[in-house]
Amino acid sequence: MVSAREVIDLLSQPELLENFGEELPLIDHLVQTSEVLWHDSGDCELAVAGLLHDLGWWTGSNESQHASEGSRLVRELGFSERVGQLIGLHVTAKRYLVRTDPRYWGRLSKESRATLVEQGGQLALDEVKRFEASPFFDDAVRLRLADDMAKDPHRVRGDIEKFYPIIAEALERAH
Ligand SMILES: [Fe+2]
């Protein structure tokens, strides 16, 4: 299992300062996602899922695989099954919301609209039912909605050190 310090170091790598298709650096997007979730829920695992949800990009995954690759990575680091599942479902949640919420399309960024087809398009009805039955359904949707809100290129990123206790608590919960 990694330490919270190692996760902060991982997030401090210069590669995360690069944009990833959106108009802001990947680290800013991750921080903004996590801030929304932490503010709204106070749930350290959900906040950490937000903070690490796009790590799959970093290891060179493609559109359709970055969620499952990110899920695998965080479990390998020692985070819980729940953190892994939430990350693994963040593309499914997008495909679900496109299918079930007519207003959702308007909330998606240009980039996110463009990648939908490659990610499998909207969910089929049987997939909708299966996803709704998942014990991770509510939180996966929350993560996704925070993800979509977290793309402000003008918001100043604070010190990521503030996530240290949240990461440490999430790691502790996994064991
Ligand atoms: Fe994202």
Image (spheres, rainbow, N blue to C red):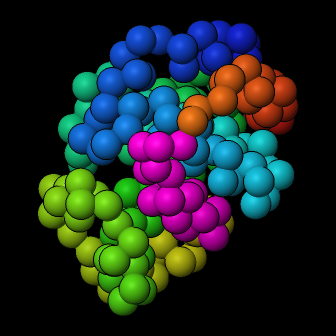
Position of 171 with respect to 73 (left or right) is: right
Q: Quadrant of residue 117?
A: bottom left
159 is within the stretch colored magenta: no
Position of 116 with respect to 85 (left or right) is: left
150 is within the stretch colored magenta: yes
Residue at horizontal 28 percent and vertical 80 percent from the top: 124
Residue at horizontal 45 percent and vertical 82 percent from the top: 129
Residue 99 location, x and y as percent? 33, 82
Residue at horizontal 44 percent and vertical 50 percent from the top: 151
Q: Relative to 127, is 83 above or below?
A: above
Position of 129 with respect to 43 (left or right) is: left
Which secondary structure class fits the magenta region best? Answer: helix
Image quadrant in which the N terminus is located? top right
Number of marks in picture: 0
User: Which is more toward the observer, 81 or 5?
Assistant: 5
Residue 98 location, x and y as percent? 34, 77
Image quadrant in which the C terminus is located? top right
User: Which is more toward the observer, 53 or 21?
Assistant: 21
Position of 140 with respect to 101 (left or right) is: right
Residue 26 location, x and y as percent? 41, 33
Q: Relative to 118, is 84 above or below?
A: above
Residue 77 appearing in the image: yes
Residue 31 location, x and y as percent? 58, 37
Q: Quadrant of residue 138?
A: bottom right
Residue at horizontal 36 percent and vertical 89 percent from the top: 102
Residue 140 appearing in the image: no
- Magenta stretch, residue numbers: 138-155
